[in-house]
Amino acid sequence: MKKNILGLVLAAAFYGSAAAQVDFDSRSNPFSSLLPAQDQNIPVPVAEPVRVNTTASCEGYPLRMRLSGRSVTLPAAGVWTLESHLATDDDYFPDSRSFPKSVSENISSHIDRSCKLLAGLIPGVNCGEVYSSKWDKEWTPPEHGKAGQGALGAVRPSKEEEIWIFNMMWVGNSMPKAGTKFLATFNGKSAVVVGGYERGPSSKKFLGGFQKEVLWYLGAQEGSSRVTLSALTDQSLPPGPITCAR
């Protein structure tokens, strides 16, 4: 217990020292005295990732995030929607373009690479099962940008990040820095997920949106399963499946 408390204190102090984009709820955060009152940036430390699918600490901390028309304190459970694909730094298009001209251009090659990544983490993956509907085979529509483009404009995630991305309807400076890791949990399964590349959905029915790969791995149903999202202290963990140490 003492080690856990010390770890949380150190984590709170670490995040409080950065220039943040998230709000911390002083009513639920036992370490609020260590944090400045203004918004906080979550840094993304450069560190050697641990081996994928290993047993690791999933330690977290109370974190209040401002969304459109509401605030949510993590950990929080809610219903999630399905999000379309974002173009990665490994996707290429004709004429040296960084983004597709339509929601379907070169999507098949993107899905092939994504499924190979999944198969490296979860042997026996059936691509037809993962990408089973037409909505699983489209780039993000060109809303205030280009097809396949997130809220950060020309910034593209890595192919390893993209299949584990989640969105929330962050407002103002509450959007975490691109690449920030969180923990998604449902029905006994957990995955390290990545935020900060895209905003949405606007409907308050949803806590946020996941890429299809996240919903598939967790065994969650879009629009009905209540998946829990938590802040994650250890930012060196790679995105993907994780077994949390008890």
Image (cartoon, rainbow, N blue to C red):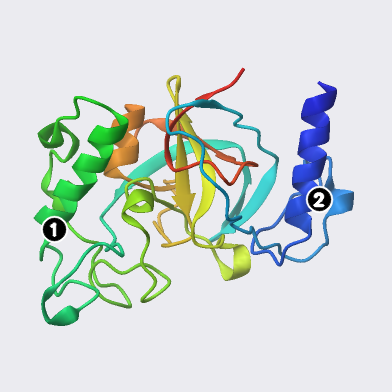
Residue on which the image places disc 2: 13
Q: Secondary structure at mark 2?
A: helix
Q: Callout 2 environment at 10 Å: few (<14), some (14 to 19), or many (20+)?
A: some
> Residue at the location (25% across, 66% down)?
148
Drawn side of residue 110 relative to residue 40, left or right: left
- In this view, the residue in front, 224 or 97, is 97
Q: Quadrant of residue 151?
A: bottom left
Residue 107 numbered mark, or none: 1
Residue 76 position (above or below residue 86): above
> Amino acid type of disc 1?
Ile
Residue at figure coordinates x 29%, y 40% from the top left: 213
Q: Give the quarter of the image for residue 5.
A: top right
Q: Position of residue 102 (x, y in %)?
A: 13, 70
Q: Amino acid at mark 2?
A: Ala
> Residue at (14%, 30%) from the top-left corner?
126
Q: Secondary structure at mark 1?
A: helix
